[in-house]
Image (spheres, coloured by chain):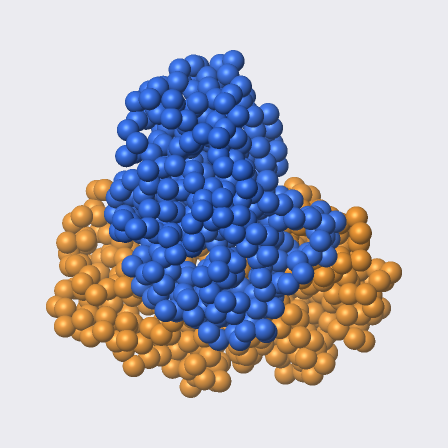
Amino acid sequence: MNPLRRKVYMVAGYNTVSMGTGRKEFNPKKERPGLEYYIKEAGQGTLKQIGGAGNVDECVIGNFIAARFNKQANMAAFFPYIDEGLRYKPAVRVEGACATGGLALMTGIKSVLAETADVVLVVGVEVQNTVKAIYGADFLAAAGWFQNRKNGHAYFFPGQFSDRAGAYFEKYGREKTRQALARWYRNAIENARLCPTAQEYHNATKDLEAQGLTEPNGKSFVDHLNVFDCSKVSDGASAIAIISEEGLKRVGIPLTDAIEVAGWGQVADDLTKDPQDRTALSTSKVAVEQALQRAGITRDQLATAEIHDCFTIAGVMAIEAMGFAAPGKGPDFILEGKTARDGVIPFNTTGGLIGWGHPTGATGVHQAVTILEQLTGKAGDAQIIIPADKPYGLSLNMGGDDKTLVSIVYRRP
Amino acid sequence: MSYEERLQNVSVLGAAGKMGSGILLLTAVEMADTSLKPEFKGKSFVLNAIDVSDQALSGLMKYLYVQVQKMAEKKMVQLRQFYSNRADLIENSEIVDEYVRYVISLVRTSTRIESAFDSLLIFEAIKENPELKGKILSSIDTNNPKKPWYFTNTSSIPISEIDKNSGLEGRIIGFHFYNPPAIQKLVELIKGEKTLKELEAFALQYAKNMRKIVVPANDIAGFIGNGHFMRDLLFGMKLVERLSADMPMHEAVYIVNKVTQDFLVRPMGIFQLIDYVGIDVCQYILSVMNARIAGEDLHSDLLDRYAGYGVKGGQFADGSQKNGILQYDKNKITGIFCLKRKEYAPFIDFQDRNDARLGNLPANAPQWKTAIRVKNRDELFSGYFDSLRKTESPGAKLALEYAAESARIANQLVTNGVSHSAENVNTVLLTGFFHAYGPVNKY
């Protein structure tokens, strides 16, 4: 792999609240802010930290499917709405289903590497509470191959991952796996309770594991997952600046407040093909391997990971794809407490997709913001200890059913 | 005739009314789901929605559209299976639209009774008036050559009596939905002396398909639901009369309503419930029961006095509460009708004084909303009633008196043979009236 031709950093992360059911202020019957509100809040949140719009060379916005949720396209032109100082600057919108945020980051990274920019403003956004979940499921199904929609489940993606869970249960045993899913859920909610912007921040359920063990009901939902196994419908945006060494000087941010992009894996697989093995995330595996290899590190040097737990079962499979556990042993890794915030490698320290929320186009950016906060010691109540010999974090952002993948390794400089 | 064949031509009488519209909705959906089975492809299904007013029928269609859509959204898994062979219907939204269109297409609105002359099953949900019911059912039956079966939604008139007055020879059963039928799980099933066995089996199947909880009641005026409610109402009226020796009557109404709601942990106080059902409907039910039940005075002069001043209750078309004995602003109680001044006295004039008079609720008083979410409530209510007994406040004393009366009424329904068991009475109160606990208990 080619070494990076220049150093690339991320700074000035910002997350809006992940809004949706679970937040006290969320009322589905009342009118709520639209796309532009979230874009503006997140964009301004980052601009304020980097000395304003004048310092920005290029802009990237990640959004999955506003064309359906909000009947809105041409998203790149929202940047001047964030700040007039962004008028006439180059801007682009990228899309890769739920990996949209990761692709937005990659686009920014490549601009810096291409030396067309020293400071790139990256925003990810999705506003999905505009329709009932049953219709949102139609929109989100676009992350799969549309020709499979007819025979798919009413809740298309929960159906896909329910099938994966079913296959996993059959191959490796149901009971322990379900316990691990419930533990994953509990960890996610407990971590979210430490992060004020998390959708589950207000969650006060006492026995989370018992709730997570709710028996799935295929008559009203899917066969192998319950609603607690699924990330919720979210509105939200995240923003971050991707920046060169010169850029850092320009915006006046010290290296201690930055993280460096150490490596990445960006891969795609054939959307029209069913997974060869439903019990494994094979494309995710390639992405993580590439990211670690490019960074020149092993997984044991990671202090934390933000992975794409759109469903609890995806969390289990991601652990195995990353090589932390052998196939079928992911549940043990979780049940032994190794992914908990005081474990060997804390996963999803602000709740991940299940706990923090999943505004699809923003998720990849949110993962980077969380790792930025953790590695720079700015994660507030959610802060974990970053050991001196493990100055790395990794994100894994997945589009569709293991189809479009972005994994990034970050280093504390 | 099979269950499905029986459903091929159905009429609902009073279809635009409060109960009729819900019955029509449930029947339309049941009919649609039956007719969508592959074996019934090509067979015609018709549901006549009969009512006296074109305007009300037009409102009914709007209601149907919204409700069917909501129901479709909730059973998407099943609907995708129904339409699995329709290549043109791919997304959930397309399937919902098609299903709603189909259900609506089964319904024919009509203001003419003749529409029921071809029906095999007729739902009666008209006014609670024995003569009117008898007249309409017999006129249909003499003109309908198919010897149809009848479901009556009467909540008080004995089925045998309607049967006899209409000459139906056992082709009728009491199928008493609770309001609103689309939401309330409870159905009281009442057989008359001659009710056909096959009709009863059909009714049970129909209730099962709609996932209703069936409680059998014997054919005695008022059955279980109104058997309890009307006597509960009369006790409330008597209590108001007693208390008004020491205070203005509207303040006594306030006290009794608050005791029955907050102290007894019910979804609404007794006077709000009377308003919800409608003063005139309550009067009708009482008069039906009073004329048919010996040895009991089921009548309230006080209720008649309110009615005499034009106090009505009931709901607006949008479901919000009309003023009754209580005054409402968007379903929030704001005042109480004062018989002396013949106008509503606003809450603020007397609320604090009477709250102080009642005394505080015990600290462990559950809220109704929270209590109904608790699965096993015995511990909760044992503890609460213990506290009520220990509390010396007038509110607690009135609540205990009221609860004892409610239990007495429930037990009386068993000894008089209206209900087979106290458990059935409890089920009716829990599921039909949304009480958080049954009146017969060990608290």
Residue A225 visible from this viewpoint: yes
> For residue A93, what is the image quadrant?
top right
State the residue in front, B343 or A60: A60
- Viewed as shown, does residue B399 lie left or right of B76? left
Q: Position of residue B267 (x, y in %)?
A: 37, 60
Residue B130 visible from this viewpoint: no
Residue A237 in the image: above or below residue A114:
below
Q: Position of residue B19 (x, y in %)?
A: 58, 58
> For residue A204, what is the image quadrant?
bottom left
Task: Farthest residue to the right: give it.
Answer: B42
Q: Colour of chain B?
A: orange
State the residue in front, A202 or B354: A202
Quarter of the figure that contains the N terminus of chain A = top right
Q: Residue at x 72, y 81 (%)?
A: B198
Q: Position of residue B63 (x, y in %)?
A: 61, 47
Quarter of the figure that contains the C terminus of chain A = top left
Q: Residue at x 62, y 49 (%)?
A: A403
Q: Residue at x 21, y 65 (%)?
A: B364
- Viewed as shown, does residue B388 lie left or right of B5? left
Which chain gets the blue colouring? A
Residue A210 in the image: above or below residue B318:
below
Task: Farthest residue to the front: give it.
Answer: A2
- Viewed as shown, does residue A238 lie left or right of B10? left
Q: Residue at x 52, y 70 (%)?
A: A328
State the residue in front, B420 or A212: A212
Residue A12 in the image: above or below residue A118:
below
Q: Position of residue A206 (x, y in %)?
A: 31, 63
Residue A69 in the image: above or below residue A179:
above
State the residue in front, B322 or A4: A4
